[in-house]
Image (cartoon, rainbow, N blue to C red):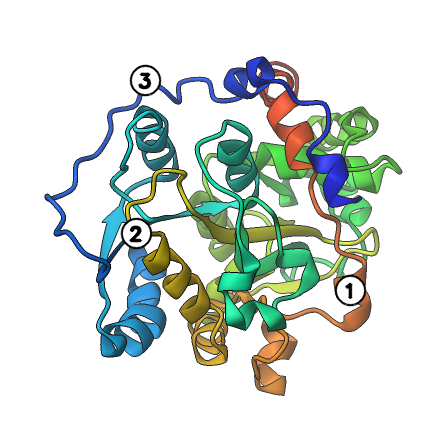
C-alpha cells in the first residue's frame, strides 16, 4: 500500500466523525513556561514509555546539551483533545506529541500539526523509509503476531490458524484491539487492510465456537498466565514483555504478513519551540536511544544503524523477509470507517 493511498479520499467531515468524543475531553494544564529556546515540552503517555524517554533521550542526550525537557503526561485522547482546543492559539503548550500511527495521521489531516522537515534531522539519514511520514516520524515499531501456549496447542503459522474455530474457548480476543483484529481477520480470509468484510464471518465462527473476549491487553495477559486461553494475536513487543514476566507463550509471524504498529511523534502547528522539537527528534534517532528502547521495552529500532544483539533481535525482531511482508494499516480507511467497525464489533461480534 502506498503512502499516497493513505492520504486520499478523506474530507474534514469524515475526520471529525472519527473523533467522536474528542472535543469534549477536558484539556490538561501545564505550568507557565519560560521564554527562550532552551525548553522542550513533550506530550507523552506515562509509565515505562515516559521513563525510558527520560532515561535514553532526555537525560542521556538532551540535558547535557543544555535543553530543559518537560513531559506533559496524559492519555492519548486527552492530549489530542488539548491540541484541538489549542488549534487557534498563536502558541500552544507543547512542542511535540507522542502518538500511534493512526492518530499521527488523524491530527495532521485535521490541520493541527505540521509537515516534518527531514532536512532538520541529521539522524533521519538512517531512518527506515517506511518510518518516514510527512505528518510524523516513527520512533519504535512492532508487528501483530500469533501467540500460543506451547503446552496447550501447536504453533499456528498464520492469522487464519489463530482464528480457527477448532480452538474453541482456548482462543481469546482483546476488545480494545477491535480495529487490528478485524483487519487481521480480513488478511486471513484473503481480503486486504481495507477489504475488512472478508474476515467478518471468520471472526463470527470463532466466537460461536467459544472464543473469549477480554476488555484490555492486561486482562488478556492474565488469561494467558492462568492458562484460561492459549492463543490469540498481539504485538510482538508486548509478547516479549509478557514472556519476561513469566507467561508461557511463544510467538509466530503470520504467513499473511504481520500488521505493523508504529509509535512516533508529531509537531503541533503552533509549537512554541520548533527548534527544540527537532533537537528532540534528532536525539530520538540516535542509535544509543533506539538500542535502549529495544533492550528495555522490546520494540524495534526505526533506524538502520542501531545495533541490536542477535539474541535480543531474535526475540523482538523480524527477519528481512518478515519485514518486507509487513502490512501497513491504511490509517485513512480506519479513520473513515471506525464508527462502522466499532458498531459491527459491539452489535454483531460481541453479542
Task: Say which mark, if any, is on residue 24.
Answer: 3
Q: Residue at x 35, y 70 (%)?
A: 57
For marks 3 and 2, give the CA distance.
27 Å
Q: Residue at x 66, y 65 (%)?
A: 128
Q: Residue at x 45, y 38 (%)?
A: 113
The answer to whether 68 is drawn above or below residue 235 in the figure is below
Where's residue 208, x and y in %?
Answer: 71, 26
Name the mark nearer the viewer: 1 or 3: 3
Rendered view: 99 above or below 109: below
From the viewer's perspective, is 309 left or right of 99? right
The answer to whether mark 1 and mark 3 are in CB contact below 8 A is no
Compare marks 2 and 1 and give the one earlier in the sequence. 2
Residue 139 location in percent, x, y?
51, 60
The one of 171 and 308 positioned closer to us in this rendering? 308
Residue placed furthest toward the right = 190
Q: Which residue is mark 2?
A: 273
Secondary structure of the residue carrying numbered label 3: loop
Residue corresponding to mark 1: 322
Mark 1 is surrounded, within 10 Å at the Cα level, by few (under 14), some (14 to 19) or many (20 or more) other residues, namely some
Amino acid at each position: 500500500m502506498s503512502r499516497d493511498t493513505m492520504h486520499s479520499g478523506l474530507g474534514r467531515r469524515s475526520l471529525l466523525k472519527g473523533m467522536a468524543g474528542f472535543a469534549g475531553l477536558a484539556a490538561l494544564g501545564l505550568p507557565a513556561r519560560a521564554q527562550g529556546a532552551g525548553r522542550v515540552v513533550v506530550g507523552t503517555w506515562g509509565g515505562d514509555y515516559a521513563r525510558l524517554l527520560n532515561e535514553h533521550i532526555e537525560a542521556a542526550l538532551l540535558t547535557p546539551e543544555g535543553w530543559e525537557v518537560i513531559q506533559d503526561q496524559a492519555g492519548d485522547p486527552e492530549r489530542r483533545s488539548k491540541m484541538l482546543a489549542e488549534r487557534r492559539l498563536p502558541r500552544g503548550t507543547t512542542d511535540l506529541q507522542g502518538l500511534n500511527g493512526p492518530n499521527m495521521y488523524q491530527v495532521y489531516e485535521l490541520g493541527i500539526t505540521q509537515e516534518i522537515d527531514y532536512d532538520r534531522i541529521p539522524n533521519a539519514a538512517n531512518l527506515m523509509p517506511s518510518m518516514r511520514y510527512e505528518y510524523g516520524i516513527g520512533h519504535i515499531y512492532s508487528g501483530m503476531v500469533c501467540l500460543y501456549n506451547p503446552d496447550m496447542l501447536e504453533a499456528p503459522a498464520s492469522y487464519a490458524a489463530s482464528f480457527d474455530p477448532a480452538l474453541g474457548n482456548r482462543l481469546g480476543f482483546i476488545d480494545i484491539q477491535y480495529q487490528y483484529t478485524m483487519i487481521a481477520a480480513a488478511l486471513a480470509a484473503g481480503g486486504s487492510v481495507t477489504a475488512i468484510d472478508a474476515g467478518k464471518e471468520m471472526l463470527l465462527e470463532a466466537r460461536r465456537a467459544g472464543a473469549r473476549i477480554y476488555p484490555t491487553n492486561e486482562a488478556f495477559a492474565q488469561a494467558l498466565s492462568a492458562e484460561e486461553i492459549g492463543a490469540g494475536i498481539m504485538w510482538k513487543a508486548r509478547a516479549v514483555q509478557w514472556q519476561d514476566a513469566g507467561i508461557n507463550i511463544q510467538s509466530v509471524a503470520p504467513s499473511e504478513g504481520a500488521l505493523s504498529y508504529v509509535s512516533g511523534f508529531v509537531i503541533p502547528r503552533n509549537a512554541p519551540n520548533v527548534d527544540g522539537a527537532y533537537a528532540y527528534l534528532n536525539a530520538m534517532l540516535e542509535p544509543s536511544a533506539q538500542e535502549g528502547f529495544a533492550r528495555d521495552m522490546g520494540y524495534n529500532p526505526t533506524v538502520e544503524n542501531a545495533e541490536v544483539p542477535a539474541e535480543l533481535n531474535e526475540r523482538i525482531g523480524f527477519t528481512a523477509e518478515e519485514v518486507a511482508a509487513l502490512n501497513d494499516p491504511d490509517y485513512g480507511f480506519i479513520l473513515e470507517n471506525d464508527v462502522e467497525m466499532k458498531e459491527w464489533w459491539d452489535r454483531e461480534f460481541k453479542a
